[in-house]
Image (cartoon, rainbow, N blue to C red):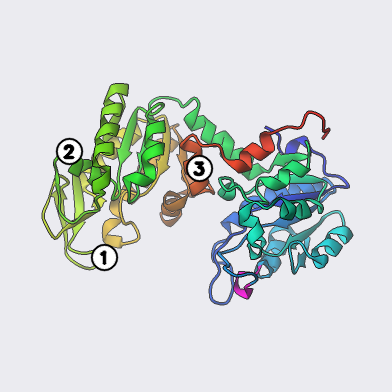
Amino acid sequence: MQTVDQFNFSGKKALVRVDFNVPLNDNFDITDDARMSAAVPTIKKILNDGGSAILMSHLGRPKNGPQPEFSLNHLVNHLGKLTGANVHFASDCIGDDAVEKAEKLQAGEILLLENLRFYSEEKAGDEEFAQKLSRYGDVYVNDAFGTAHRAHASTSVVAKFFGNNKCFGYIMANEIENAEKVIAAPEKPFVAIVGGAKVSDKLLILENLMNVADTILIGGGMAYTFIAAQGGSIGNSLFEADRVDLTLELLKKAEAKGVNIMLPVDSVCADGFINDGGVATHDSNSIPEGWMGLDIGPKAVEEYKAVLLEAKTILWNGPMGVFEFSNFENGTKTVAYAVAESTKNGAFSLIGGGDSAAAIKQFNLKGEVSYVSTGGGALLEYFEGKTLPGIAAIEVINSEAQP
């Protein structure tokens, strides 16, 4: 794996794909700078070597060209505070302003380019657009794991113009290294926690995990399709009727492989998708009509906790219930604390981005687990066994080029 540690950036301009897609409030203040903070070590490595960094990112989902609310100019001051560097801003990512400022950029300075997605060519993976971006830098660094599953101009296509002068930043390297600890050679017993709304969203990851996991704990709305498929009554709980046969097939495969798929024996239910309505606990296979399971129940919580405390490797992808509602957060919260306790006892725990990462943050447990992924969708596809374009583009080495 070629990373920034294999390069000396002295006198070089590094073109760095970062993921600065951070949330902003109505005043355009950053409400969570985790993605920006995570990129600082890579940026500082380049600057401390005596190089300069030209950063490119997307922000939000602009539809028709430039939109002021999605301008990366909102991030300039905070980026300066995080890095302690002089930060310039280019009002376009490929126009004359960017070219001029890139040429004048001095060692130890940063140039932040305007939002890549103001151009439709970015998401289209347009080669001409990628080539224009490539002219800014001597070395290409991809440190945006959250977009690694996208074959966009800035995440994969641009790399072809750098020969061997391309590498992973620290975020990308850490994500790959930690994912491999889980999927390639996990210490046993390996427990995977898979939650979320739909079985269809997690089919591939479930199939792949069956090759390495000892136990898979199922939570969230997807659990009720499993339960209904086995003849249970699930009331008004989430249910994918067209996934029943596939669900039964998954259970048979797991049994054949000796993998224990655990479903919640009981559920905390509501009489509507609201926090302050009726709340009752029922066995998961006998939920009355008019009620829906919104969290795993107290018996399931204890069963899952016991399994997690015996684990040596843990992967968590997806919540146990609607943890945004206080009446239905206990399952996710207890699982989070059990993961933290198991980690304290020596287990390796990988939190798979998205809602799982949000839960770890909500319950103040980030420092209590081994690694929290920055890319939910990218990590999910990685565990599904898919090739991520952002990773493949760096790993393809041109034997004729010299770093």
Q: Nearer the viewer, mark 3 or mark 1?
A: 3
Q: Marks 3/2: CA distance?
A: 30 Å
Relative to 391, is 295 on the left or the right? left
Residue 151: image tag: none
The residue at 63%/75% (across/down) is 68
Callout 1 crowding tier (Cα within 10 Å): few <14, some 14–19, many ≥20: some
Label 2 neighbour load within 10 Å: few <14, some 14-19, many 20+: some
Give the residue at x 65% y 71%.
66
The type of residue carrying mark 3 is Leu
Is 4 located above or below residue 280 in the figure?
above
Q: Which residue was labeled with disc 1? A: 275
Q: Nearer the viewer, residue 168 or 162?
A: 162
User: Quarter-wise, where is residue 261 in the image?
Assistant: top left
Check disc 3 and report the residue beneath it.
379
- Image coords of residue 385 (percent x, y): 49, 34
Q: Along the polypeptide, which appears first: circle 3 or circle 1?
A: 1
* Residue 369 in view of the camera: no
Q: Is residue 68 magenta?
A: yes
**Coordinates of residue 317 in the picture (x, y in percent):** 41, 44
**Magenta stretch, residue numbers:** 67-71
- Percent from the top left, x then y, of residue 350? 47, 39
* Magenta-span inclusion, residue 290: no
Task: Please name the residue shown 78% across and 47% down the image.
Answer: 46
